[in-house]
Image (cartoon, rainbow, N blue to C red):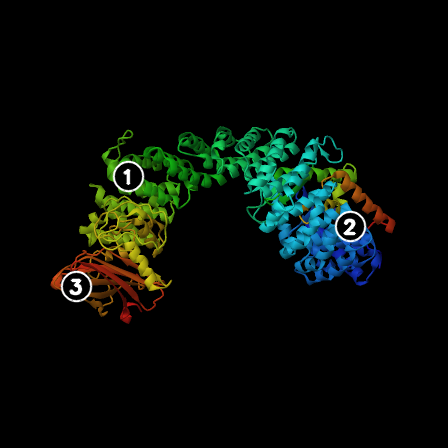
Amino acid sequence: MPAPIRLRELIRTIRTARTQAEEREMIQKECAAIRSSFREEDNTYRCRNVAKLLYMHMLGYPAHFGQLECLKLIASQKFTDKRIGYLGAMLLLDERQDVHLLMTNCIKNDLNHSTQYVQGLALCTLGCMGSSEMCRDLAGEVEKLLKTSNSYLRKKAALCAVHVIRKVPELMEMFLPATKNLLNEKNHGVLHTSVVLLTEMCERSPDMLAHFRKNEKLVPQLVRILKNLIMSGYSPEHDVSGISDPFLQVRILRLLRILGRNDDDSSEAMNDILAQVATNTETSKNVGNAILYETVLTIMDIKSESGLRVLAINILGRFLLNNDKNIRYVALTSLLKTVQTDHNAVQRHRSTIVDCLKDLDVSIKRRAMELSFALVNGNNIRGMMKELLYFLDSCEPEFKADCASGIFLAAEKYAPSKRWHIDTIMRVLTTAGSYVRDDAVPNLIQLITNSVEMHAYTVQRLYKAILGDYSQQPLVQVAAWCIGEYGDLLVSGQCEEEEPIQVTEDEVLDILESVLISNMSTSVTRGYALTAIMKLSTRFTCTVNRIKKVVSIYGSSIDVELQQRAVEYNALFKKYDHMRSALLERMPVMEKVTTNGPTEIVQTNGETDPTPLETKPPPSGPQPTSQANDLLDLLGGNDITPVIPTAPTSKPASAGGELDLLGDINLTGAPAAAPAPASVPQISQPPFLLDGLSSQPLFNDIATGIPSITAYSKNGLKIEFTFERSNTNPSVTVITIQASNSTELDMTDFVFQAAVPKTFQLQLLSPSSSIVPAFNTGTITQVIKVLNPQKQQLRMRIKLTYNHKGSAMQDLAEVNNFPPQSWQ
Amino acid sequence: MIQAILVFNNHGKPRLVRFYQRFPEEIQQQIVRETFHLVLKRDDNICNFLEGGSLIGGSDYKLIYRHYATLYFVFCVDSSESELGILDLIQVFVETLDKCFENVCELDLIFHMDKVHYILQEVVMGGMVLETNMNEIVAQIEAQNRLEKSESGRQP
């Protein structure tokens, strides 16, 4: 068999290939030759074969059949073989192959080899890919080499030790004694790697960190070394552009940072040297800047005195003005880290940061944007917003979503006036409307609803905005919602803030219909538009017929969501016309609840308090929230989801919890359901909508004949449940409760609460009143809707609270006697 | 820690590929390609730092690169390394290559891939910086080359 070709020739051959296929062919041929050569167990050519294999591996071809050959090379006596063998092991092998364990013995022998370069190879390989078992076995050898006087080996041993510690943290203790003398070395390579080792130990173990601070007096040692580096003058071996070993300086500064963090004594010990480095370092070359940068980070991270911190931030400020992009990037990154702690100092550089928004470099722009958002506060909001809006206009698409969200957040926190806030939102919607996140739409709607005096202005501006262009979905959604709500203000031409425009009802309907028809509108947007048109039927006077026509057309729409809405609205026109105006009333002011989640129990009957949950005054009855918590506790488990009863009046309830509950019951999957609070049940909540309004069976085909049950009867209070099931939605059971009182005194402040297991969802609608009259002269009716998608057996725990005969009464009961037809 | 060191030319052909963390082979190639595309898009007057691609591991990692004539030198590092320091390190590495190969050019890297690896091994070990003194590195490499030469007259 002819001698295998040399690596050089192989490379030359491959380079002549003109296509990928040709290259692949050559490589396959060569692989076959290599394989047969391996089979012949020829020692002479093994290393050149493995070299070729590594080359092919780099190009992306499989080379695993060479793994064992690498091991054979490692075991060879020749340095040449070992060199390529170890390289091959590092490139081709890893912990997951069992083969690598075979290396352990070879490495052990080589760690004790007479030639330092062989020892070096072994250390290098162990430090790159040693598994935990290997590290455990060989840690002792590494530790020995850490104490040798050979600086070449010592520095490699230090890094190898780092790897060992990473793999087997328990072995850290073992290296501690060897570290005592490491910093006394003159050789910079050893110093450098020793500092890395010490850094690793300090970062991993707080005990080590404490030990080094106190016992080893590490800080003074490091300060001494650093001082020597700065003051020692020109040293040709370590000089890089006039600075003595900048890499070592940077490493030491980093270790100082870790030592000084949260520790006053250490921080004090390094104040001087940090000030010295900060003021003396040459900044004309990159190396000087690297050191300064590291110094600044250290100053900011430790407990330095304030003068030093100001110095540091000023250095960063100077960096910002540097011509070098890298420096500017690095400065912005560090300012971002420090803006939380040293806010005022960073504010001083605000104008420079804002200028960076106009930089051409994408990375710099992103950093500048993040930093700008961090710097916005009540004082500079107007100016900053102008810049940010301008940035939003001109930035790359990948930024627009983040920028828009950031602007919304900032505007919400610091808006100087409602009008400004709405203007800003409008501006964002019109410039970056399609990049706005989906969750921004309900937030905006809530904001608009709550700024009562701005309704006319808002709707007018929104109308004008979509007149020209209705392709940006979030904008159209918000606009459609507002037009639906405030259309009457729009056509009546009342607007104080700006010149009112003349709009007729037909024009408004025109635009809404175009949105419905347009191909660019998503299903969600269409839903918004249809609902808006419906709402206008009570707000407009002359176009009701047109609205009826539109609604009936969509009754046969392919889109199920639209179809359902249209059918319901149709029903509203036909059968429930008397309720239409009540249903489509103006939205009340929404509560902003900061925490969400179905476990949040909100206000119960009778309270009209719009303040947030935490500051609610206790209602006249027992605390509803604590009650509900007790309910949770008593129910004793995670399998009960509590329920939010709604207020009986049309006053605003705390809608946050309601929002979430209804958000959970996302039967039709319409996100448009979310923003609608329900002090009066809203149109966008089919099929719950019409049901709750009367206790008559509402569904056209009802499952008749479900027996009613007495759920509770005690102390003269009797509660009966009657059931209805729907054929259109078989998972829903509607329970109507009737509470009656056979005693001779009324029961007042009656509150009914219910909880069901987690697989169910429950909604309580408003009770008819809160007084159960005596002598069975009347009843309280309340509707409960239960969603039971898994058709599990219905169970319920109820809690009753009321005042009777001058004392507060409270009772818990479990209802288990649900007839099977109510849930099967 | 340095996660990977990649050297490729202006057409994306890899000239040196060294990973310090284990990735399967296909992923390695994918990373090289992805990095090449990210780096190619960069103008020459933009800063040398890039947030890493999705393959190489998420938000903690940055790509720091330098462009020399026909070659890109890309170091993928995590937040424990100083960005400006790594830029200097790349410079040291390239200057060392220059000293070892005497006016290094792409062809040297192509035909002496193994030697380049050996030089790199003296600079970075296990993802950590080992030695930054150019003269030291060159001296050690030369000593090892002499050792090889003395063992056999032939080069592989």
Relative to B141, is A508 on the left or the right? left
Coordinates of residue A722 in the picture (x, y in percent):
22, 65
Measured Cα–Cα span from mark 2 to mark 1 = 76 Å
In the displayed structure image, the side of residue A386 where residue A129 appears, left or right:
right
Q: Position of residue B129 (x, y in %)?
A: 68, 44
Which residue corresponds to mark 3? Answer: A740
> In this figure, which residue is indicated by the disc labeled 2?
A10
Q: Secondary structure at mark 2?
A: helix
Q: Residue furthest front?
A: A215
For the image, the number of numbered tags is 3
In depth, the one of A462 and A266 nearer the eye is A266
Distance in Å between CA atoms under marks 3 and 1: 50 Å
Answer with mark 3 or mark 2, whichever residue precedes in sequence: 2
| Tag 3: amino acid | Ser
Q: Is residue A342 left or right of residue A323?
A: left
Look at label 1 and name its amino acid.
Val
Q: Kindly identify which residue carries mark 1.
A: A508
Residue A482 position in % (x across, y down): 30, 41
User: First in sequence: mark 3 or mark 1?
Assistant: 1
Chain of the residue under the numbered disc 1 shown in the image:
A
Q: Position of residue B30 (x, y in %)?
A: 62, 50
Vertical placement of residue A297 versus A117, above or below? above
Discs 2 and 1 lie in a common subunit: yes
Q: Earlier in the sequence, mark 2 or mark 1?
A: 2
Q: Is residue A205 left or right of residue A648?
A: right
Which kind of residue does numbered mark 2 sit on? Leu
In the structure shown, which secondary structural element does the residue marked by tag 3 occupy?
A: strand
